[in-house]
Image: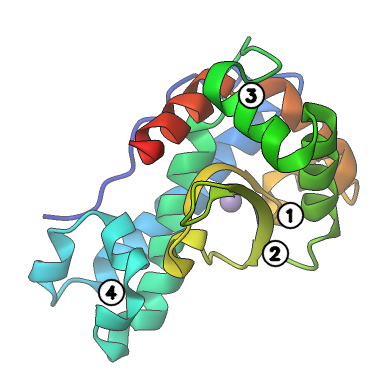
């Protein structure tokens, strides 16, 4: 058993003009694939761990043997984070959440625009490489936060439903240093149906 790079749910050019095909191709086929390959190499001598979903290892990093813990945190995080990121996007998606998630966002942030502002400023203000997230906490409330490098909120007992990659490799070819412009464009391709579905799955 080895971890596999899942097929991208749309062609490389599907998210243009917001995310260009070249960025998608390199991001998916080099960066994400690289994390999967390094994760498999790190776990080569640990077949028991290999059999588990990567999210399960990240939820309990202390149970991972110390000699490969950092590798699982970094490369396993890289694998899990990118899987969510690809699924969170789709061409021609609806521009707002609906139903239960729309209500929960209003309850936690006041209104949708206030949530969007909070998420965007968290993503643009994150120092260095990392990710911004919308997560469910233990009591079912929604929170916005960012993590460094490939760290995931899963490791803090939270349930991530929406994420944006703010590593420079996610936007530099098209947006160079203008991370806020990438974030503004990214809202156009958020797949709210998928985010809502994930939210409802986590609520149970
Ligand atoms: Mn990335």
Classify the position of the N terminus by image quarter. bottom left
Please name the residue that numbered disc 4 is placed on.
42
* Badge 2 vs badge 1, beta-carbon distance below 8 Å: yes
Q: Is residue 64 visible?
A: no
Q: Which of 1/101 is in front?
A: 101
What label does residue 129 carry, if any?
2
Pick the front one: 146 or 168: 146
For label 1, the crowd category at 10 Å Cα-Cα, with few meaning under 14, some 14 to 19 and many 20 or more, is some
State the mark number for residue 168: 1
Q: Quadrant of the C terminus?
A: top left
Q: Secondary structure at mark 4?
A: helix
Residue visible at 63% across and 24% down in the picture: 102
Q: Earlier in the sequence, mark 3 or mark 2?
A: 3
The quarter of the displayed image where residue 13 is located: top right
The residues tagged by marks 2 and 4 sit, at their Cα atoms, a distance apart of 22 Å
Question: Tag 2: Cα neighbours inside 10 Å, few (<14), some, or many (≥20)?
Answer: some
List the residue tagged with mark 3: 102
Q: Tell me which numbered mark, 2 or 1, is placed earlier along the sequence.
A: 2
């Amino acid at each position: 058993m080895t971890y596999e790079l899942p097929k991208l749910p749309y062609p490389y050019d599907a998210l243009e003009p917001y995310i260009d095909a070249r960025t998608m191709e390199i991001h998916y086929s080099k960066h994400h694939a690289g994390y999967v390959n390094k994760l498999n190499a790190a776990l080569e001598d640990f077949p028991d761990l290999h059999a588990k979903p990567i999210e399960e290892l990240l939820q309990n990093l202390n149970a991972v043997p110390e000699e490969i813990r950092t590798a699982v945190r970094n490369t396993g995080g890289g694998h899990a984070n990118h899987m969510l990121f690809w699924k969170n996007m789709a061409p021609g998606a609806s521009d707002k959440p609906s139903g239960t998630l729309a209500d929960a966002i209003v309850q936690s942030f006041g209104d949708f625009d206030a949530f969007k502002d909070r998420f965007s400023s968290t993503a643009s203000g994150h120092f260095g490489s990392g990710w911004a997230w919308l997560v469910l906490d233990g009591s079912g409330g929604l929170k916005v936060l960012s993590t460094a490098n490939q760290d995931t909120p899963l490791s803090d007992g939270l349930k991530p439903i929406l994420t944006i990659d703010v590593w420079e490799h996610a936007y530099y070819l098209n947006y160079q240093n203008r991370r806020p412009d990438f974030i503004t464009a990214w809202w156009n391709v958020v797949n709210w149906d998928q985010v809502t579905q994930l939210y409802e799955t986590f609520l149970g």
